[in-house]
Amino acid sequence: MKVIIIIPTYNEKANIGSTIDNLEENFKKIPSKHQMSILVIDDSSPDGTQDIVKAKKAKYGNIVLLPNKIKAGLGAAYIKAMRYAMEKLEADVVFEFDADGSHQPKYIPGMIETLEKGADVVIGSRYVPGGSMPDDWGIDRKLVSYLGNFIARSVLWTWQYKDQTSGFRGTKTNFLKKVDLDNLLSKQFAYKIHLYYALHKLGAKIVEFPIDFIDRSKGKSKFPKNNVIDSLRVVFTLRYKENEKLFKVAIVGGIGTFVQIIFFNIFRLFTGLSIAQNIAIELAIISNFVLNNIWTFKGQAFKFSQAKKLITGFLKFNLTSVGSIIIQNIIMLGGVAIFGSSFLIENSLVIVGVLIGLIWNYLMYTRVVWKK
């Protein structure tokens, strides 16, 4: 395999030389069938970082310096370097690697062996057995790191992974080429979360490799102040995009519920409970159909100019809503039989019925009414 270690730098004069030396020393432990190279992408460091990289390039011969005139963030630098590694250097594997010494080169041989054994992505993980965070980190910093991973895993429902914010990762390019790198949600540190999730959704075999993460001993930390907010934005945006239609169906259903409750309470004054319930449900169905057609499923909408298709779609919508109507009536009549009849109980049962019926509706909307 042709393996490219990508190192983004900005004012890393104090660290880049020793980082490259340590990598080169560990390359000797890797089978010769693998071609190891280092790609340094430097954001026009004014401290002389590039001069050191050029000197190391002359010494080792397997180093590429990629000057980056526009400093647009860590994620932007990595994306540019990944493209260069795949398109110009014909990389089979790219590693994301910090210049500051926090990622230890001694793990590279074992991580490459993991890729050889069938992994598509190998993550340097602090949270699997054998991994650790720096001992000198305060409880506040450890808590931020732990909670960040917990939120990412819970919101994205990726409990099988322990460390989704790790910056130490090796990825086979046959999977990386499938990722839309130009449209990752962050150009900063949080790009890691989106890229991790994108690889997961592509079905990549992701293996976590235990590492001891150590803090930099020289230079100034580049950790952005808004990293926590940016990471939360990425995580919740990914969840919304993943279930956008479900969220919209829920919002439309909420509006339909309001319509249903209003008319249920109007008609229950003049008719029987069951009649009031079903008239209110039909009015809610009309509301739901119109709003879902023009908003939730606008890409597959029935056009008002095509009356026949519109009417057919509305009838299909009504038929598929029968399941929800049955569910809501069972809950209403069964609930009244168990708990008795009162304004509070009846309206509570309406809401419970709507929430359970939402699951049925979503499946019918996406698989029958507005199926692609």
Image: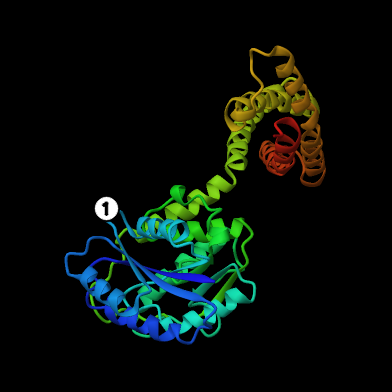
> Horizontal placement of 321 versus 189: left or right?
right
| Place of residue 211 in the rendered image (x, y in percent of width and height, measured from the top left) | 48, 81
- Residue at horizontal 48 percent and vertical 74 percent from the top: 35
Residue 131 seen from this side: no
The foreground one among 25 and 33 is 33
Quadrant where the C terminus lies? top right
Which of the 4 quarters of the picture holds residue 61? Answer: bottom left
Dot 1 falls on a residue whose secondary structure is loop
| Place of residue 220 in the rendered image (x, y in percent of width and height, measured from the top left) | 23, 72
The foreground one among 3 and 201 is 3
| Place of residue 343 in the rendered image (x, y in percent of width and height, measured from the top left) | 67, 36
> Horizontal placement of 52 versus 164: left or right?
left
> Horizontal placement of 197 versus 167: left or right?
right
The foreground one among 243 and 222 is 222
Q: Residue type at mark 1?
A: Ile
Instruction: Please give the residue where the numbered disc 1 appears in the rendered image.
Output: 70
Which of the 4 quarters of the picture holds residue 270? Answer: top right
